């Protein structure tokens, strides 16, 4: 079951998954017991003709005390395991600086690696087998970072920092989504976590830390100019510095990403063309304006952006 908490890829999620499965089994046993007894009683004591009222019993204090105490004890036991799991998966940041800062926006994810000075969007890269601390922020309204196989849900609240430890133990691409309703495109606020061997992760970081690619070829060069003229640059940064505009996703290495618009479309020239032509048709309600670009303007912008590897 890819993409569910039943297939954990971190010790944090394994703890949560074990607790969840344990409670699920206890719940299933109780459900079967209660349903079974109700069915048994319905059949065993069904009306069998005759009109007289059956024997009525009022009160059985011992039995009533037992069925009050037993569930209470069970709930206390579950509470104990829950508190133990919470402490294990959320130990707080301590004095560890964040490895990543992830900010939720309507409807995309801003991602920074403060030490490496990298700014990217919508795709988190992590090295396998390393414990990483995520600092989670809300950029406009409340969002919630959730990659079910990786760890717990954590809210992203404007003005309040939350922390999340993750330690992926498997390489691969793992999908997540915003788990707090945040407006029209909440359902299309998807996140990809790409877990790589350390060397591959380091190479990715080196590549992302490089300055934007200088456009090569006339279409791409024209696209670079249009990017400034058509005011794309007022919302999107294509640069090497972290301190740049962050209204829309940073596009510095856009061409190296798998998807467009927080997971709505695969990142291909055709799909980027579709997106630039009419962002609302692809993702209704999103904040990217339709700039009424001509086909040739779109062609140049696609050449420029897809070259930003
Ligand atoms: Cu962001 Cu829901």
Image: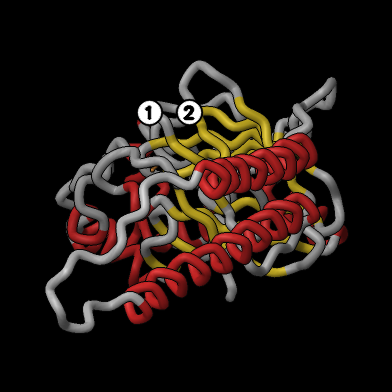
Task: Look at the numbered disc 2 and give the secondary structure of its residue.
Answer: strand
Q: Could you say which is closer to the camera, residue 171 or residue 224?
A: 171
Q: Is residue 100 visible?
A: yes
Q: Could you say which is closer to the camera, residue 9 or residue 45?
A: 45
> Could you tell me which residue is drawn at 63 percent across and 51 percent down?
124
Q: Position of residue 30 (x, y in %)?
A: 54, 63
Residue 120 relative to residue 142: left or right? right
**Residues under labels 1 and 2: Cα distance?**
6 Å
> Could you tell me which residue is drawn at 77 percent across and 39 percent down?
84
Q: Position of residue 289 (x, y in %)?
A: 22, 42
Instruction: Kindly identify which numbered label has been placed on residue 81.
Output: none
The tally of labels here is 2
Location of mark 1 (residue): 141
Q: Position of residue 86 (x, y in %)?
A: 71, 38
Location of mark 2 (residue): 138
The image quadrant where one finds ligand 1 is top left
Q: Position of residue 7 (x, y in %)?
A: 67, 69
The 10 Å Cα crowd at callout 1, few under 14, some 14 to 19, many 20 or more, is some
Q: Could you say which is closer to the camera, residue 119 or residue 171?
A: 171
Q: Tell me the quarter of the image containing the C terminus.
A: bottom right
The 10 Å Cα crowd at callout 2, few under 14, some 14 to 19, many 20 or more, is many
Residue 66 relative to residue 187: left or right? right
Labels 1 & 2 near each other (Cβ < 8 A) = yes
Q: Tell me the quarter of the image containing the N terminus.
A: bottom right
Above or below, 201 relative to 250: below
Residue 21 relative to residue 191: left or right? right
Disc 2 residue: CB within 8 Å of ligand 1: no
Res 96 quadrant in image: top right
Residue 264 relative to residue 246: left or right? left
Above or below, 50 relative to 113: below
> Could you tell me which residue is drawn at 54 percent across and 67 percent down?
28
Disc 1 residue: CB within 8 Å of ligand 1: yes
């Amino acid at each position: 079951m890819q993409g569910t908490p039943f297939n954990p890829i971190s010790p944090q999620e394994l703890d949560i998954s074990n607790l969840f499965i344990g409670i699920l089994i206890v719940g299933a046993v109780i459900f079967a017991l209660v349903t079974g007894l109700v069915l048994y009683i319905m059949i065993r004591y069904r009306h069998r003709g005759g009109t007289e009222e059956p024997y009525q019993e009022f009160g059985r204090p011992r039995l009533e005390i037992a069925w009050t105490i037993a569930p209470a004890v069970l709930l206390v036991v579950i509470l104990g395991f829950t508190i133990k799991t919470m402490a294990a998966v959320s130990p707080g940041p301590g004095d560890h600086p964040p490895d990543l800062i992830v900010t939720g926006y309507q409807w995309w994810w801003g991602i920074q690696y403060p030490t490496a000075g990298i700014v990217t969007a919508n795709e988190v890269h992590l090295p396998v087998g390393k414990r990483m601390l995520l600092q989670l922020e809300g950029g406009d309204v409340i969002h919630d970072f959730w990659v079910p196989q990786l760890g717990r849900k954590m809210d992203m609240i404007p003005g309040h920092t939350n922390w999340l430890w993750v330690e992926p133990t498997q390489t691969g691409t793992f999908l997540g989504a915003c788990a707090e309703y945040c407006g029209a495109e909440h359902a299309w606020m998807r996140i990809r976590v790409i877990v790589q061997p350390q060397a591959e992760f380091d190479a990715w970081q080196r590549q992302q830390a490089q300055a934007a690619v200088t456009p090569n070829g006339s279409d791409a060069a024209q696209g670079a100019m249009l990017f400034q003229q058509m005011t794309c640059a007022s919302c999107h940064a294509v640069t090497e510095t972290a301190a740049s505009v962050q209204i829309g996703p940073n596009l510095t290495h856009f061409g190296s990403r798998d998807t467009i618009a927080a997971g709505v479309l695969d990142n291909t020239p055709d799909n980027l063309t579709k997106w630039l032509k009419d962002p609302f048709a692809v993702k209704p309600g999103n904040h990217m304006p339709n700039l009424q670009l001509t086909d040739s303007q779109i062609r140049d912008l696609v050449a420029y952006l897809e070259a930003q590897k």
